[in-house]
Image (tube, grey):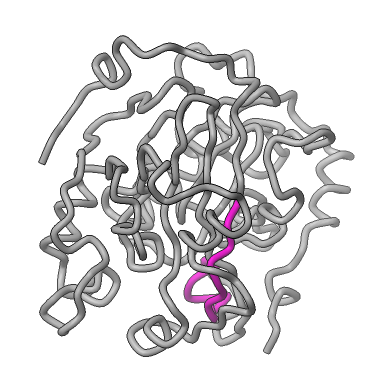
């Protein structure tokens, strides 16, 4: 296991401007999910909907990077995990080659937000890539708590995980992996989860992994007076809430891995007219729990909503029960 610090990751490399950086969402298929036990804490339990599984191809002009690698085939996913439908979606390596004209051999690095089964499939297709993952995730994946044997496809169940035999570079602290590509801690969904900030000409786009499932997780739960309607799928709810706040502090746009609306607004990000979030905006009646903005970013806090603006905003929010398909 190789550990590195931020000062020696891209030492000696040319730094290009963020204007060249593009992000391409890749939908690798659909999984059935429960809106109450997965997508929303105190959501409508028993109500189901189909959520996509995205990974992301990032081209900086100098580096070609994947962030997560998405789903396997429909049969394997359904047999071992959740009901899966591909609905014409390709697996990541086929999508890159057939849709974007990018060869697997061109990928310089695969950065993993975490090592759950639906984020790591087909990683061995990228033979020339560095595999980069959070240190705590690597440790959990190779020695999972029994409750998470299936989540990490533990060999004790007779399943071979996608990363069997792979060598990872382990990230222990927040650091800039490549110029403009930064991993930062967002544990809660899993013990070592780290989201990825991609600096672009339109602002900082956070690829959130599963720290949130949908954009709605960043908005209030009016009935409970929560500032965020956080996901329910946490190993640690305290850390999970903190991670949602951290994303809110950092992101001008968020790409959650399971949100069709956020990822399907454009085939490439950023794009002209892309909506820019209001970072850490105070809403009357809905409190933050954790502290200040990250260093050197206090000026990015958005002005607080007025009482009138808040009333209108809250009335416009989607109720999770209305997202149910059955």
Q: Quadrant of the N terminus?
A: top left
Residue 162 picture quarter: bottom left
Q: Nearer the viewer, residue 107 or 32?
A: 107
Count of marks overlaid on the render: 0
Residue 34 falls inside the magenta stretch: yes
Residue 89 falls inside the magenta stretch: no
- Image coordinates for residue 158, horizontal then vertical, percent: 15, 84
- Decide if residue 10 is on the left or right side of residue 322: left
Image vertical order of residue 291 relative to residue 323, above or below: above
- Image coordinates for residue 199, horizontal then vertical, percent: 56, 25
Q: Is residue 133 visible?
A: no
Q: Nearer the viewer, residue 110 or 95?
A: 95
Q: Residue at x 33, y 68 (%)?
A: 117
- Decide if residue 279 is on the left or right side of residue 210: right
Q: Is residue 70 visible?
A: yes
Image vertical order of residue 250 relative to residue 91, above or below: above
Q: Residue at x 65, y 38 (%)?
A: 253
- Image coordinates for residue 38, horizontal then vertical, percent: 49, 71
Image vertical order of residue 227 relative to residue 200, above or below: below
Which residues are drawn in magenta?
25-41
- Image coordinates for residue 51, horizontal then vertical, percent: 59, 71
- Decide if residue 321 is on the left or right side of residue 39: right
Q: Residue at x 46, y 56 (%)?
A: 210
Q: Nearer the viewer, residue 171 or 291?
A: 171
Q: Quadrant of the C terminus?
A: bottom right
- Decide if residue 163 is on the left or right side of residue 30: left
Q: Residue at x 55, y 72 (%)?
A: 29
């Amino acid at each position: 296991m190789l550990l590195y610090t931020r000062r020696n990751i891209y030492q000696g490399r040319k730094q290009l401007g963020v204007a060249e950086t593009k992000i391409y969402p890749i939908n690798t298929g659909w999984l059935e999910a429960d809106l109450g036990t997965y997508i929303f804490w105190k959501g409508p339990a028993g109500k189901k909907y189909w959520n996509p599984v995205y990974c992301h191809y990032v081209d900086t002009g100098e580096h070609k990077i994947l962030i997560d690698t998405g789903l396997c085939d429909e049969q394997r996913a359904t047999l071992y995990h959740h009901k899966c439908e591909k609905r014409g979606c390709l697996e990541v390596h086929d999508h890159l080659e057939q849709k974007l004209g990018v060869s697997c051999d061109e990928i310089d690095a695969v950065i993993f937000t975490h090592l759950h089964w639906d984020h790591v499939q087909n990683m061995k297709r990228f033979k020339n890539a560095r595999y980069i993952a959070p240190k705590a995730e690597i440790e959990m994946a190779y020695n999972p708590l029994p409750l998470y044997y299936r989540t990490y496809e533990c060999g004790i169940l007779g399943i071979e995980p996608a990363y069997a035999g792979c060598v990872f570079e382990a990230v222990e602290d927040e650091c800039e992996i490549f110029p403009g590509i930064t991993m930062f801690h967002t544990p809660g969904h899993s013990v070592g989860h780290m989201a990825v900030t991609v600096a672009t000409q339109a602002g900082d786009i956070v690829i959130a992994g599963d720290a949130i499932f949908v954009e709605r997780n960043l908005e209030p739960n009016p009935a409970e007076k929560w500032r965020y309607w956080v996901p329910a799928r946490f190993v640690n709810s305290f850390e999970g809430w903190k991670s949602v706040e951290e994303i809110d502090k950092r992101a001008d746009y968020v790409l959650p891995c399971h949100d069709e609306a956020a990822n399907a607004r454009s085939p490439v990000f950023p794009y002209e007219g892309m909506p820019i979030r209001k970072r850490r905006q105070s809403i009357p009646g809905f409190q933050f729990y954790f502290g200040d903005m990250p260093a050197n970013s206090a000026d990015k806090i958005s002005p607080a909503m007025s009482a009138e603006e808040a009333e209108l905003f809250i009335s416009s929010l989607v109720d999770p029960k209305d997202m149910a398909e059955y």
